Amino acid sequence: MKEDLEAGKHDKIVTRFPPEPNGYLHIGHAKSIVINFGLADDFNGLTNLRFDDTNPLKEDQEYVDAIKEDVKWLGYDWDELRFASDYFEVMYEKAVLLIKKGKAYVDDLTAEQIREYRGTLTEPGKESPYRNRSVEENLELFERMRNGEFANGEKVLRAKIDMSSPNINLRDPVIYRISHATHHNTGDKWCIYPMYAFAHPLEDAIEDVTHSLCTVEFEDQRPFYDWVIAECETESKPRQIEFGRLNVENAVTSKRKLKQLVDEKFVDGWDDPRMPTISGLRRRGFTPEAIREFVKATGVSKGSGVVDSAMVEHFVREDLKLKAPRTMGILRPLKVVITNYPEDQVEMLDAENNPENEEMGVRQIPFSREIYIEQDDFMEDPPKKYFRLFPGNEVRLKHAYFIKCEDVIKDENGNVVEIHCTYDPETKSGTGFTGRKVKGTLHWVDAKHAVPAEFRLYEPLILDNEEEAADGEEKTFLDNINPNSLEIVQGFVEPNMKDVKPQEKFQFFRHGYFNVDPKYTTPEKPVFNLIVSLKSSFKL
């Protein structure tokens, strides 16, 4: 881009982000968005958002709206909003031009026959018996295709290039097919639609795109891209450049597979927090800043390796550590009664909202005779080096006092249902008490003022990316669905969390970062999605 500008080849850089509206965007698309919008911004250029809507059978307005929302959420704004379907008349005229030049013909072969005639990587293809139709006959047939005189699959229009080319993409590729289907944008105006490989270079040329940036699977298509630009005699001459795909460990990035997960109800929608879709990551609590920084850190190259999911989580933690208020939440409650604390007394304790960001200030939390702690923070018969609560042991309550376990209350089945403790009023946090030390610090929530909350804990939806069965046949990716990808638990949060808003983010002491779920949170009960845990295994 820099060289092209310096050489005077272009006055301004123009890129485009061209998704097909046949599903929701996923983490892989984020790379294309960041590259196209980001590079154009770097050179004070422009980026169009263009929908490659040439297949009416798979596309829908729902996907158009979702894609627009995702791009804006990631922090980008397009110069112009375009649709490939806006150019259908121009594309038709260019196809007619190819026919008149003897560069395209109407073929009656079936799709299966076309595949057979195409040949293989080591064997040349065979010419169709309809390849040498006259220009006049091809023009008449193509017009009749447009007029709806033929059934789906009865005829196609093919480019006439070279059936013996070592690049299979140049062996007379199909450029138009018949599809009697209602289009989301053009309705029933058309019953023939251009193929993506033919439409895309024309779209770029019509929009004066200077650099058509796409993923490496289109590298083999570049000779056909250039052929279309040359033979269709476009005024603008865009240049296609490829970059490696972004693949994340344990993440499905096939829209077909993602749609299957939604349709077969393995998830509760495209925005399920276990989904690698942009909307799923947003609902889970990922931030646009974290995703942008993650994509930039992966770099731009032709390589398409798999990125460790811990790398994505690292950037989320880095972004949230100074933004997210600290608070305490109990996911699996166990009641503690402090027997020597006055029964009717409630005191307010100071707690920092974020020790790493003093500007976030201090909140006050209530403390009284009964509190909740985590079930995992008590053991009746603990192993060595267990520093949390057990009979006779003393621990510190975060922001509060030392408490000591004196008694354990069990139900008829022998399950611990309540713990009785005593507290030392001299050990109040913040008073500078130095009389003795304890090794364990527990988080807690005051029982009288606790707000009931739901917590949704996530693990990878797909256990691994291996899809080959033992017998050598490809098995469905659904065989790798993790049955434990979602765990829902009921607990409590501090009373100041009663009026949280959807998409607010918090760090729960010792648990991790959580996001207020926008789908299931109600005024009566907040629902928190686990974004990431506190600990990271990733090293930059």
Image: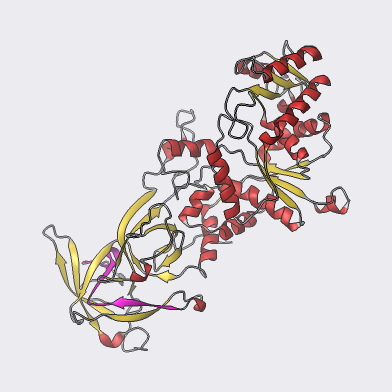
Residue 158 x/y as whole percent: 72, 21
Q: Is any atom of residue 425 visible in this view? A: yes
In the displayed structure, would residue 288 be above or below residue 19?
below
Residue 63 x/y as whole percent: 55, 41
Question: Magenta region: which residues?
Answer: 362-382
> Residue 51 versus residue 378: which sits nearer the camera?
51
In the displayed structure, would residue 491 be above or below residue 306?
below
Instruction: Quadrant for residue 110, please give it.
Output: top right
Q: Residue furthest top?
A: 129
Locate the C terminus and report the quarter of the image it occupies: bottom right
Instruction: Quadrant for residue 117, please give it.
Output: top right
Instruction: Quadrant for residue 73, please give it.
Output: bottom right
Q: Residue furthest left?
A: 412
Residue 376 x/y as whole percent: 29, 64
Q: Is residue 379 magenta?
A: yes
| Left or right position of 231 against 54 | right
> Residue 463 versus residue 5: which sits nearer the camera?
5
